[in-house]
Every structure is written in structure tokens, then in C-alpha cells.
Amino acid sequence: MERGLENLRDEVFRRNPGESEFHQAVTEVFEALGPVVSRHPEYADAGILRRMCEPERQIIFRIPWVDDAGTVQINRGFRVEFNSALGPYKGGLRFHPSVYLGIIKFLGFEQIFKNALTGMPIGGGKGGSDFDPAGRSDAEVMRFCQSFMTELYRHIGEHTDVPAGDIGVGAREIGYLFGQYKRITNRFESGVLTGKGITWGGSLVRPEATGYGAVMFADRMLRTHGRSMEGQRVLVSGSGNVALNAIAKAEQLGAVAVTASDSSGYVVDEAGIDLELLREIKEARRGRISEYAEQRGGTARFVAGASVWDVPGTVAIPSATQNELDENAAQTLVKNGLIAVAEGANMPSTQKATELFLQAGVLFGPGKAANAGGVATSALEMQQNASRDTWSFENTHDRLETIMTGVHDRCLETADQYGAPGNYVVGANIAGFIKVADAMLAQGVV
Ligand code: GLU
């Protein structure tokens, strides 16, 4: 890493102690930026990178609510409004027991560059809570969401900050959050949240967009080498919204997706995942992944407590969570003949795993490029809300495809320009950074 960047990185670590995921996200960006800072001294003169690492605003609040047994529960809520140079803060909400400020800051920081890469007018932010929706009744989730929004509402708005979903926040949660926002503000302000239900301001393709986009990105990468998704044996981790839709798109493009996982283990199905069955178990019933193997029989088996990355495959779409794919897993995957990775989750590969993939010549699409389809389609939802219009599935899907092609090409061209041909990590970080840096430069020291 370049000397000035190293000093700045150390300063960021000191100012944000104990936030290891945030440190990791910052390190990844800094490692790519060496050639940019030497070509553009004006960025350092204006303190661009130092400002970028300090969120514009960080909100932390108490979320009191009463569970079904009548017990008072307290959770902690976060919204980190990281950067508004390109548009209103935009990024999801994560409800998961692991959530603390360091996780929200890593996600918010990534979101700045990801959103810039989409070419849409959106800034970067992220929020969430350490609330665990697992095992909670609908009524409990509703009361929690209402309490969360009772504080959050004063910080958001269609021109200010536009949250959406992430892990633990899907259509149900967005519904309860929107209802409470509408009640408090007495406004049907559809552009304040994205991921809404289709009859009340949501966009077609938004539910599918992250998973679809990641597989489209993998397909684009493969095509630069005269291949495609067709005939690939695809390994997907996770079994949430991103994973399910990655499996769907892989199948549409003629690949065979053979795995899915959750925190209890993974399933491998040699005949290809039966998506209808998996959706019924995970989406309709919120059940465990082992039930898939029990009900599918013959071709499928469940492996408890092991890594899905032990399964041989040619394309990996990690779609579970951060740091789910480490150096050992990367080694196994490379040994087993992997040719491409497109990250459906945010930062699922550890830094060492990423390095290993790059050294081995695996086509590697980092999350801030490969999973940008979700937030890009959120921006399309905002456009529809602003014009009080609804677009067809085909039109929205075409727009998503064009956006993903654009993200892919921008990464590749930028990597070329900065002396790292074929390196999507360098390309994504530099292209995202320059777009935001130029806007910040133009807008002065704010
Ligand atoms: N949580 C998603 C992401 O990581 C989507 C955010 C959004 O749609 O605003 O990009």
C-alpha cells in the first residue's frame, strides 16, 4: 500500500477502534487506490479520502418494544448516513444479532462505491439493528418495526435518505416500516423506502434484482473469456432472497445450481436445486435447509455444520454474509476447478481468499460490483415513485441488464486504465471512488 494511504488507514483504524469489518472494507479500497492518488494529487489536497472515511452522520438509538409474553425488550438501532455527494443516502437495513456499529459502517462504506458504480444518482448509507427476527411472531416483528421507525422517521425522506432491505429485512418488514412512517408523517411518500410491495409503490424485479444481477455479472465476466453461464456447475451459498434468485437466474441461463446453505449446514443436489421446493421451505415456512434434502430425497443430501465450498463447481456465487469464504475455502475451490466468483453478498470473501482467487487467475467480481443490481433496481423503484408510474417486468429487467453490463464494463475499462487488466477489484474500487471524489471536489469542503 502507498505510504500516504497507509498513514491514513492507520488513522482510520485509531479513530474507529474494534470495528474490524469496517477496517477490512477500508483496507480493500485503499489497496486499490495507489495509482489514483499519485495521478490525482488534488484529491489528497482536498482531503477527499479522509472525508470519505468519516460518515456525514451516525445515528444510534434505543428501540424498546414488548414481546408476546409481555416482556419489555430493548434493541439498538443504527443509521449511518455515509456520503451524499451523488444523491440521497441509499442503502438497506439489516436486522441480525451480529449487528453493531462496525458492521453498519463497513456496509455503508461499501455502499458509497457500489452506488456510484451503478451510474444512478444515489449516495451511500446503511442501517439496522441487533434485533433477531428468527423465531419471532409476525406481531412481534410488527411492534419492533414500528418502534424502530418511530425514531428513524425523522432522519429519512425521499430526498434525504432512502432505506431498503438487507439480511433480516424483506417485504414483511418494509411493509410494517412503511405503514408506521406513513402514520407518523401523514404522507404517502412512496420514495422514502424501496423494496415495497408491488401494489403500493414497489417495483417489479426488485425482489429478484440482487441475485439476478450477480449471475448476469458472472455471465459478463465469462463472456470476456469466450465462455458463458451455460453449462456451468454453480455453487450458491445462503438461502435468502439473494441466493434463491441467483439460483433462478443461473438456471435460466442454462447452468446447474447444485447447492444452498444456512447456518446449520448445506444441501447439495446433483440434479440441480428444485427452486420451487426450496422457496416453499425457506420463504413460505421460514424452515431449515435440512428439510430440503428430506423432502427432495434421492439426488440431494444435507451436510450438517460443514462448508458449502467443499463441493466442486465451476462458478461460485457467495450469497450468505461477510467473510463466509476464507483462504482455505478458496484453496479448495481453486483445486476443484473453479473459474469464476461473483459475490452476491457484501464482502463474503476474506481478503486472503480474494488475493488467492486473483493470483490463481479466477475471474473475481467483488460484491460492490457484482451485487449492485439490488440497489440499482431500488433506484429504478425511486424513479417510478417520483413519476407515479409502474414499469413492466420486461422493461425493468432490461434496465437491470443494461446497468449490470455498464457496471461490468466500467470495472474492466478502469482496471485497464490503471494498469491492472482483468482485475475487477481494482476496477470497481477506482471507478466508484473517482465518481464520488469528483463530485465532492466540485461541491467544496462540506
Ligand atoms: N442491501 C442491499 C445492498 O447491499 C440493497 C440496498 C438498497 O436497495 O437500497 O446493496
Image (cartoon, grey):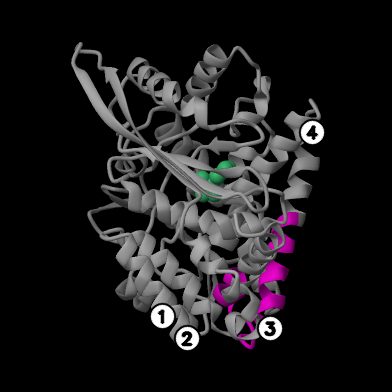
**Where's ligand 1: which quadrant?**
top right
Instruction: Give the x, y percent position of residue 226.
Output: 71, 78
Residue carrying label 1: 6
Image check: 379 left or right of 364? right
Q: Secondary structure at mark 2?
A: loop
Image check: 347 left or right of 63? right
Q: Secondary structure at mark 4?
A: loop
**Label 3 close to label 1 by CB (< 8 Å):** no
2 or 4: tag closer to the N-terminus: 2
Residue carrying label 3: 416
Q: CA distance from mark 1 to mark 2?
A: 6 Å
Q: Is residue 64 visible?
A: yes
Tag 3: residue type? Asp
Q: Residues within 10 Å of mark 1 (few under 14, many from 20)?
A: some
Instruction: Give the x, y percent position of residue 131.
Output: 31, 33
Residue carrying label 4: 391
Residue carrying label 2: 2
Q: Nearer the viewer, mark 3 or mark 1?
A: 1
Residue shown at the point (68%, 83%) measured from the top left: 416
Q: Nearer the viewer, mark 2 or mark 4?
A: 2
Q: Does residue 160 lie above or below 201 as drawn?
A: below
Tag 2: residue type? Glu
Q: CA distance from mark 3 to mark 4?
A: 36 Å
Q: Residues within 10 Å of mark 3 (few under 14, many from 20)?
A: some
Instruction: Give the x, y percent position of residue 73.
Output: 23, 23
Q: Nearer the viewer, mark 3 or mark 4?
A: 3
**Label 1 close to label 2 by CB (< 8 Å):** yes
Residue shown at the point (28%, 27%) measured from the top left: 135
Residue shown at the point (58%, 44%) measured from the top left: 89
Q: Nearer the viewer, mark 1 or mark 4?
A: 1
Q: Residues within 10 Å of mark 2 (few under 14, many from 20)?
A: some
Q: Residues within 10 Å of mark 4 (few under 14, many from 20)?
A: some
